[in-house]
Each structure stands twice: as structure tokens, then as C-alpha cells.
Image (cartoon, rainbow, N blue to C red):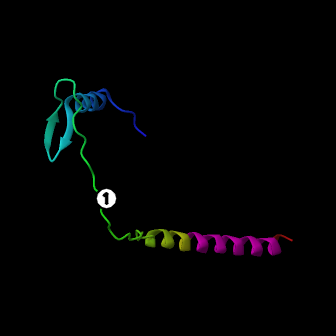
Amino acid sequence: MPKKTRKMKQRAALRRSVGVYEENEIVEEVAGEPAPRPRFESTSRAFSPLAYDYSHIYRDLKRIALFAGFFFAVLIVLSFVIK
């Protein structure tokens, strides 16, 4: 993982010192009082499991299995030929 750069650290410090973002506006701190934090309401959304596409992996696994089977067959044939 890349490390934080000086620029990223400065931006984070600036965000902390200025205030928090609410609806694309900056809420500044009032002399000594902390800025109000945004409240996030929990929404009840239906959970849907993610559907991943592994079709490219299945093709690779089939190709690997074919190569492995071919080379095992070659080894078995060579074991009989060499004796």
C-alpha cells in the first residue's frame, strides 16, 4: 500500500482544522466550539449479495487441467518406454 504523501497529510490537517463538510459546504468552527458533526441516518436497504464474474478464471483452470493431464499422460508413457 502506498504511504501517505505530505500533500495528503496537509489536506487532512486542513479539513480537521477548518471543520466538516456538509452538503458541499464547509461548516467553520465558532471560536472554541466544535463544529457539529453530520448525522447519518441508517437506511433500511435490502441486502443483496455481490455477484462476481469468474468466467475468465474458469477458462484458465480448464486450460491448466488440460496441460496437467497431458503432461501426466506423457510421464506415464515415458515411464513404460524407458523401462
Task: Say above or below: 32 vs 37.
Answer: above
Which of 37/16 is in front?
37
| Residue 73 belongs to magenta span | yes
Which of 17/4 is in front?
17
Q: Residue under circle 1?
A: 42
| Residue 51 belongs to magenta span | no
**Amino acid type shown at disc 1:** Ser
Q: Quadrant of residue 16?
A: top left
Task: Say above or below: 38 vs 79.
Answer: above
Q: Give the tally of numbered discs.
A: 1
Counting from the top left corner in percent of width and height, residue 41 is at: 28, 56
Q: The N terminus is located in which quarter?
A: top left
Write the start and end of the magenta stretch as one range: 64-81
Left or right, residue 60 beside residue 79: left
Which of 49/74 is in front?
49
Q: The C terminus is located in which quarter?
A: bottom right
Counting from the top left corner in percent of width and height, residue 23 is at: 15, 48
Left or right, residue 27 beside residue 45: left
Element at label 1: loop
Q: Main secondary structure of the magenta part?
A: helix
